[in-house]
């Protein structure tokens, strides 16, 4: 493993731990050249379905895009990075388990909204407002009213 700081090509592992869900390994590494430490994560590469975009294009499933969208929705909310990672792990597993070779981007978006709804309603509304591209305040208020009806 190359050092991300100095580029030295032979770092050593000083600690390894199994991730919380048991599906990854966290390794603390140290560079013998610059003596800096860093963390790497090792996980099994799973075969994920291709994503069919609204315009018909197909692209590889991108975990980082989902994490990024969820992080933006959860900014300044009481949702930890670990919670987001766990939600994305669960979504990824769900998409792998479905066995489909392709899934629509809208299915992913709806699944992300459902996951956020369970964790933080404000993050859910933030994500929904971007994902559903509300045209005006009436559409936004309609979503909020639905949220209020379903939370009581």
Image (cartoon, rainbow, N blue to C red):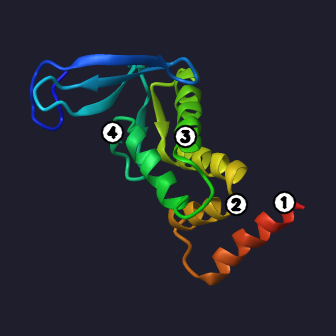
Distance from the alpha carbon under mark 2 to that under mark 3: 18 Å
Q: Nearer the viewer, mark 4 or mark 3?
A: 3
State which tag comes first along the sequence, 2 or 3: 3
Q: Nearer the viewer, mark 2 or mark 3?
A: 3
Q: What is the tally of numbered marks visible in this picture?
A: 4
State which tag comes first along the sequence, 1 or 2: 2
Residue 59 circle label: 4
Q: Secondary structure at mark 4?
A: strand
Residue 151 circle label: 1
Distance from the alpha carbon under mark 1 to that under mark 2: 9 Å
Distance from the alpha carbon under mark 4 to that under mark 2: 30 Å
Residue found at the far bottom of this picture: 137
Q: Tell me the crowding category of disc 3: few under 14, some 14 to 19, or many 20 or more residues within 10 angstroms, Cα based.
A: few
Q: Quadrant of the C terminus?
A: bottom right
Q: Secondary structure at mark 3?
A: helix
Q: Residue at x 12, y 32 (%)?
A: 34
State which tag comes first along the sequence, 3 or 1: 3
State which tag comes first along the sequence, 4 or 2: 4
Q: Are marks 4 and 1 in contact (CB under 8 Å)?
A: no
Q: Position of residue 67 (x, y in %)?
A: 46, 46
Residue with the mark numbered 2: 121
Residue 3 circle label: none
Residue with the mark numbered 3: 82
Q: Are marks 1 and 2 in contact (CB under 8 Å)?
A: yes
Residue 147's image quarter? bottom right
Distance from the alpha carbon under mark 4 to that under mark 1: 36 Å
The answer to whether residue 133 is visible is: yes
């Amino acid at each position: 493993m190359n050092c991300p700081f100095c580029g030295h090509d032979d770092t050593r592992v000083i600690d390894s731990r199994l991730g919380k869900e048991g599906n990854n390994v966290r390794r603390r590494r140290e560079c013998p050249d610059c003596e800096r430490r860093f963390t790497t994560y090792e996980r099994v590469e799973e075969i994920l379905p291709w994503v069919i975009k609204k315009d018909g294009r197909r692209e590889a499933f991108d975990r980082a895009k989902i994490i990024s969208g969820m992080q933006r929705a959860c900014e300044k909310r009481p949702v930890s990075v670990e919670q987001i990672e766990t939600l994305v792990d669960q979504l990824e597993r769900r998409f792998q388990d479905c066995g489909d070779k392709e899934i629509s981007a809208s299915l992913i978006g709806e699944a992300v909204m459902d996951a956020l709804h369970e964790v933080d309603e404000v993050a859910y509304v933030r994500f929904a407002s971007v994902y559903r591209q509300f045209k005006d305040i009436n559409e936004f208020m309609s979503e909020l009213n639905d949220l209020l009806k379903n939370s009581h």
